[in-house]
Each structure stands twice: as structure tokens, then as C-alpha cells.
Amino acid sequence: MSCAEGKRVYQGSALTRRSALQIGAGMFGMNLPQLLQAHATSGQQSEMSCIFLFLAGGPSHYETFDPKPSAPAEIRGLWDPISTNVPGVQICEKLPLMSKRMDKVAVVRSWRGRSGSHAAGSQHVASGMIPPATGQYYPNFGCLLSTLLGPTALGMPSFFGLPRAARYTDPTGYLGAAHAAFDIAGDPVEPKVRVGKLKLEKVRFESRQSMLAQLDNLGKLAESSDDSIISQDQFAADAVNLLTSGRMQRAMDIEAEPLALRERYGLNIYGQRVLLARRLIQAGARFVTINHAVQGGLFGDGTTNGTWDNHGWLFDSMMSFASRPSAVPKDSTWHSYRGPGNLPQFDMSLSTLLDDLEDKGMLDTTLVVAMGEFGRTPKINKTAGRDHYPGAGCAVLAGGGVKRGIVIGATDSKGTEPSTRAWYPEDFAATVYKAMGVDPHSTYLPRLARPTPISPGNIIDGLLS
């Protein structure tokens, strides 16, 4: 059905079941009613949601939550540790806001990956499954959880990616396009929503008329005919309701929040994405992935997907991209960005998110995870940076049944490897599933060729209440 045909159908006396299904399929390149039916028949019951801050590019554990002040200078770096409100626990001095909130979180210091590749490492962290050599097959656990559990409120999509559902990954894996995330790119004040091939510059879902008018403005969409679309009438109605209820639009209106709160998150696209994630969860989304990394320096223009991939000039870049370090070669392009760098922006937004969720009574039912695809090398390199290092790293978790004010595991005195039991990405996935109310060792989704548990990992000892 073309956009024009969809508009004529709407302007008629009734929106027929067949037409509703065609609009859903044509808009999204997917079988939306079947997606809703999958949610309804999953049999899962859970009040839990998750905000996953994916620190894309790989943050340094030395300059975040596992400083090594007694290590040699070429390992410990330039910054000192700071005491926190949890006795005996120190973190990097450049995280002063989080130092006052460590009683709300758990830090896993004995994280260990299996790949130093951005692609393989990201796919492993985001799915909990080691990707085969042929590429990602298993879905990210955000997709799987949204498929198994659905949204927490009708008229709201389950899964969002800000600005995408995870870098270097194919989030849906074997699940297919019907389970794709709603990706919200750009500035959250002027969001751009992408689902499959559909792109909406401004979101107005409050009526079918405005929805169809937007689609007309996009030009012709490919005509869709899908003889496999079979659904009960209620799922056709729910599909249209999801697109037109206004719940998603209202959730995306971050300017409805008090200015003081928006300032605490950070008045830039990175801080506002974290605020938007809270609003989406509050409105009924199940899982929101934020690629939380500021773009600038050697890597970009300050407006798109950022990175923690600090191979050079780490101590400058983590704090700010505003000034070009004097040691950067003259033939290297430096992209200036006036806002805070990754470390202060992360400190602002995560600390505010924890306060905000707790103030709204949402922290106990919202799991918060912050981690990247690997850590960074123990030795600082010749360009004052650290390189990819899957041998050791750390992660922060809060809310959703996570014990507060604890540290799980440790690395050796130089931060080169775990000195206690190592916890791998598959263990984090198993723990996330468990916290969300899903048995990680059960077999779901019979589309697989043989029964396969959704996670081969173990639940991290001592992390959950």
C-alpha cells in the first residue's frame, strides 16, 4: 500500500483490518501486528526495565572505576584516585559526582572480554554470545528482552536505541527486522526516528492524519504485500494504536522537563539522551540502549556517534575536545566540540540519572548498566593514549535488584588481569536476564535449529539481592 493509498483509506469511513495491517507493514518494513502478538503470547511477566549505557569504543578502567595509584607512572596515568561515600572504595578523581553516589551502585572490577576487536567485542557484550566468524547471529539482549517481555505499557514500543541500538552490531540477529529497535538519532530536542527504512524528522503520532501526512512528505515508500501477515483483529488495532496513541510523542518531549534537571543531565545531545531514556522507560519502554560517547577530537564532528577509543591524547580527550592538544600532528584533523568530554559528561548524566530514578520511585524497577566492549592497555603508549585491551576492564550496575555500595572482584596491582574470578560478557548477559525476570538458561524462540539457552553464562556472584 502506498502512502497516498493509506491516506485515502484513513479518510474513508473506517480503517479496515487489512488496511491497518498494510499500513503497519508498509511503514516499518516489518510485521508489526505479529510483533505485538509475540509480545502478548510470550507468557513472561516482569515489571523490570533497563537503561544500558554502552560506552562505545572502550573506556579505560584506570581512568574510571579501577585506578592503580601504586603502579608505575607509565601505567597509573596522570590522575589520582578520590575517596567515595563507600568506605575503602576509590575511583578516578575526574568522577567527583559519582564519588558521592557509589552507595547506589555496584562495580564489577574483574570484567574480562575475549576480543580486542570493536566489532566482535561489541557483539559479545551486547548479546552475551561469542559471535561466529561469519558475523553476528545472536540478537542483542535488548532485542531479545523486548521480544520476550514487550513494553510495560500499551501504545509504546519496547526497544529504543539512542542514537542506535549498539555500534558494530546487528541488534536483531536471527530475530529479523520485526524486532528492530526504534532508533532516535540527532539532538533529542529535534529527534529523528528510524525504524527499518522509515525516517521521521519530527515525531507526531497523535493522529493517523498527521502520521500519514509525514509519510507523504517522505515520498513514495515501497509497496508492501506480505501474504504471511496473519493476526487477530486485536493485534491489528494494537498496531495502529502504537503508531497513533501519542504516548511515544509525549515521552520524547524532553523540554517538558524542568530546566534545572535538564542542566544537571547536561545541556547537550549526550546528556539529553540519558534524560530521554528515562522518559521512554517511564512511558513504557522495556529497554533503551544509549551509545554514550561524545564525538570530537580525531574522530568526528561533534554531532554524531561518539567514541571512548582514546588511542592518543587520552587525558586531553576524555575531559574536552575544545582545544587541540599541542602534540597532535599538524596533518591530523582535530574536530572541536565545546561541550564536556566523555568523562565529565558521563559523570554528570549517570549521577543525575540515578538521582532522578530514585526520586521518581523508578530505581528499584529500572536496571542501569554502564560498560564498553573492552578496557584499555596497562601501559600508556607513545601518543599518551591507551589501546584496545580485552584482558581487563570494569562495569557499573545499579537499580533493578542490584546490591548497593559494593565492589565485585579485583584486578592485580597493575590492572593487567583479574586477580579474582573473571566475569565475561556472557555472565553479564545472564545477570541482566535474571535481573529482568527472565531465566537465562531456558530455551526460547524455537526458530533456532536446536534448543539453545539465551545465555551460556553464569549469574555474577553477589551482585543481585
Image (cartoon, grey):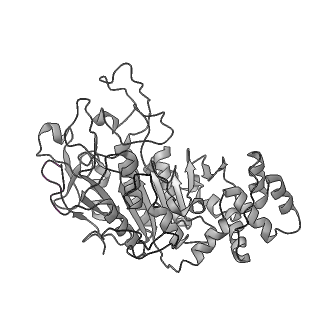
Q: Quadrant of residue 25?
A: bottom right
- Rendered location of residue 313, percent (x, y): 30, 32
Q: Is residue 352 visible?
A: no
**How many numbered discs, if any?**
0
Work out which quarter of the rendered image holds the C terminus and state it: bottom left
Q: Is residue 250 left or right of residue 282?
A: right
Above or below for 169 versus 326? below
**In the current view of this chain or complex, which residue is farthest to the top?**
330
Q: Say whether residue 419 is magenta.
A: yes
Q: Is residue 314 left or right of residue 220?
A: left
Which one is in front, 407 or 132?
132
At a point 56% along the width and 61% down the height, the residue shown is: 176
- Rendered location of residue 265, percent (x, y): 44, 51
Which one is in front, 453 or 432?
453
Which segment did they paint magenta? Answer: 411-420
- Rendered location of residue 358, percent (x, y): 41, 66
Q: Is residue 148 left or right of residue 229?
A: left
Please, what is the dominant secondary structure of the magenta stretch?
A: loop
- Rendered location of residue 416, percent (x, y): 18, 49
Q: Quadrant of residue 308?
A: top left
Q: Say whether residue 135 is magenta.
A: no
Which one is in front, 19 or 93?
19
At a point 44% along the width and 33% down the height, the residue shown is: 337
Above or below for 421 versus 386? below
Work out which quarter of the rendered image holds the N terminus and state it: bottom right
